[in-house]
Each structure stands twice: as C-alpha cells, then as structure tokens.
Image (cartoon, rainbow, N blue to C red):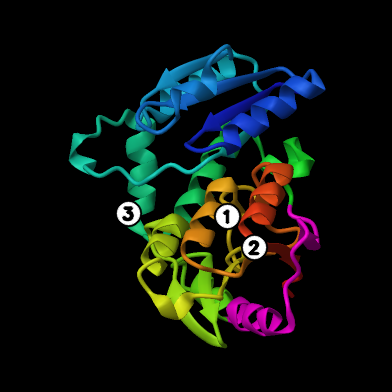
C-alpha cells in the first residue's frame, strides 16, 4: 500500500481516517496544525505539529516521510487574524494566488489541491481511504422520512444547490415547504444553533448536499453524532444528505443517536 499523508483539521474525520489506515495495515503520517487539530487525534500516532501557514514545511515533511497520497480530513477555520501569520515563501505564493482572484472557499480548496499535486502528491478523498464514511442511499436508523418530509427535502435540495452555486454553504433548513435557514461561513453548527431560537423550524429538515462545482476530494458535506444532537435540540424531524456525495462520521453511532432522538437520517439522490 502507498503511504498516506493525513492533513488533519478539527473534528472526528481525521480520527476515522487514521483508524481506517490502522485496520488496513496501511502506513501513514499525520500533519497536525496548531490551533486546529485536536491533540487527542494524534496521540500514539506518527505525526508532526506544523503551523498552518508553513506550507513549505508541510510539503518537505511529507516528502521526508515517504508519503505518496494525501488526504485533507476535517475542517480548518479561516484564521481570525491574518496579520498574525508568519507564512513561509510557499505560503506567500499560495496566498497571492488566492487573493489575486478570490472566488470563495471552493477556489481556495482547489488551489490547495493543485499545490499538493504540483509537488508530486496524489490527493484522495477521505471516502477513498475509509469507504464506510460515504453516505448510502436510503435511511440509516429506524425512523423514516414521511411524505411531508420528502416534500421539504425536495425544496431543500433546490435551495442548497442554489446556495452552493454561490459558494455560500452546503446546508439549509426547510419546514412546511419554506426555506427557514441557510448555512453561512459559521457552518452547520451555527445554522442549527440559530434555529433553536426559531419555533418555525420545529418539525423541519436539515438538507445538506455538495456544492455543484466543488472539489469533491475535500470538504464533502458531513454529519456526526454532534449534528444529530444539534438537530434534535433545534426540534427538527430529520436530516437529509446527498447519497454518495456526503460523509457520515461514524454510521452506527449516528444511527443510534438519531434513533434515540426520534430523528430520521436519510441519503437522497441529487441529480
């Protein structure tokens, strides 16, 4: 097996990718980013801590470790203070490309992928390493989506597709055929948190799909147990994800959490 380099952001996705490598006996090395990667992610794991803005250091370490393929796993927030960064020359060159023709997060991620590929690495999606992460078609868990939910899901897919085409987000909340919430830079957690205070969203559906033109090897829509718990706190009836185009971080755990909360989680086709 080729050696995998894991560029680890926050959350549980890097943990799942690392676990998949261990199960497969696949060699791997983790790049952890200070202030973004959770320390527990890299316990007892071959890794190096590198500042996010030291792009040259990341690439050199990956080469030194004999890495062939690279996966970007987990979210990395935009730095709160760009002026506090101390980028190396590779990072400066990348930042200039980003700012020269800024077109949103998709453009940034595509540039990062091209930077890695230009240095000789093959970039793969997390689902290529751990196939069980990919959301299947149909429900997981025992609660079904009723007809009224299916209508909300159809409205949500159209709204999320439009939102994604503008590179604004991947998720919307729909209830009673009305779009009541749109994901912004704060992410799905912020969308759900805001919905807790809106009684109109009760019984609604969180719909989350990939952006139409996004780089699908990075930043696929994802949900985990925390998403289910936040949706339950917001009074939603369920969650709809793009089948074959989104990730479930711990399918069994998500199904159990949804069952306990009385929510449905369903994979839906998106044309």
Residue at left 64%, top 48%?
217
Decide which of tag 3 and tag 2 comes sooner along the chain.
3
Q: CA distance from mark 3 to mark 2?
A: 42 Å
Relative image position of residue 88 (x, y in whole percent) = 32, 28
Residue position for label 3:
99
Provide the secondary structure element on which disc 1 rests. helix
- In this rendering, the answer to whether 161 lies above or below 128 is below
Residue 70 in which image quadrant: top right
Decide which of tag 1 and tag 3 comes sooner along the chain.
3
Provide the secondary structure element on which disc 2 rests. loop
Can the viewer see residue 250? Answer: yes
Can the viewer see residue 103? Answer: no
Relative image position of residue 54 (x, y in whole percent) = 37, 27
Q: CA distance from mark 1 to mark 3?
A: 36 Å
| Residue placed most toward the observer, 157 or 152 | 152
Q: Which residues are magenta?
A: 135-158
- In this rendering, the answer to whether 236 lies above or below 219 is below
Residue 137 part of the magenta segment: yes
- In this rendering, the answer to whether 148 lies above or below 210 is below
Residue 197 in which image quadrant: bottom left
- Taking 10 as reference, is 1 left or right? right
Relative image position of residue 16 (x, y in whole percent) = 65, 33
Residue position for label 2:
263
Residue position for label 1:
228
């Amino acid at each position: 097996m080729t050696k995998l380099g894991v560029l680890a952001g926050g959350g549980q996705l890097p943990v799942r990718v690392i676990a998949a490598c261990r199960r497969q006996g696949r060699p791997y090395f983790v790049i952890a980013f200070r202030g973004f990667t959770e320390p527990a992610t890299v316990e007892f794991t071959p890794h190096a801590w590198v500042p996010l803005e030291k792009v040259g250091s990341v690439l050199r370490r990956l080469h030194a470790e004999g890495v062939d393929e690279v996966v970007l796993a987990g979210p990395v927030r935009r730095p709160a203070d760009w002026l506090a960064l101390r980028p190396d020359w590779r990072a400066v060159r990348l930042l200039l490309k980003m700012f020269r023709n800024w077109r949103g997060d998709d453009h940034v991620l595509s540039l990062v992928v091209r930077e890695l590929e230009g240095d000789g690495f093959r970039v793969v999606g997390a689902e290529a390493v751990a196939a069980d992460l990919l959301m299947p078609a149909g429900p997981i868990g025992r609660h079904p989506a009723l007809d009224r939910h299916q209508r909300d899901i159809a409205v949500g897919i159209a709204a999320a597709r439009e939102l994604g085409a503008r590179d604004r987000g991947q998720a919307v909340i729909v209830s009673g055929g009305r779009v009541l919430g749109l994901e912004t830079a704060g992410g799905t957690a912020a969308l759900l948190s805001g919905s807790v205070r809106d009684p109109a969203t009760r019984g609604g559906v969180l719909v989350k799909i990939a952006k139409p033109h996004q780089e699908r090897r990075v930043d696929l829509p994802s949900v985990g147990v925390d998403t289910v718990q936040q949706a339950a706190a917001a009074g939603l009836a369920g969650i709809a994800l793009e089948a074959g185009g989104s990730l479930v971080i711990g399918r069994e755990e998500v199904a159990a959490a949804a069952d306990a909360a009385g929510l449905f989680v369903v994979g839906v086709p998106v044309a």
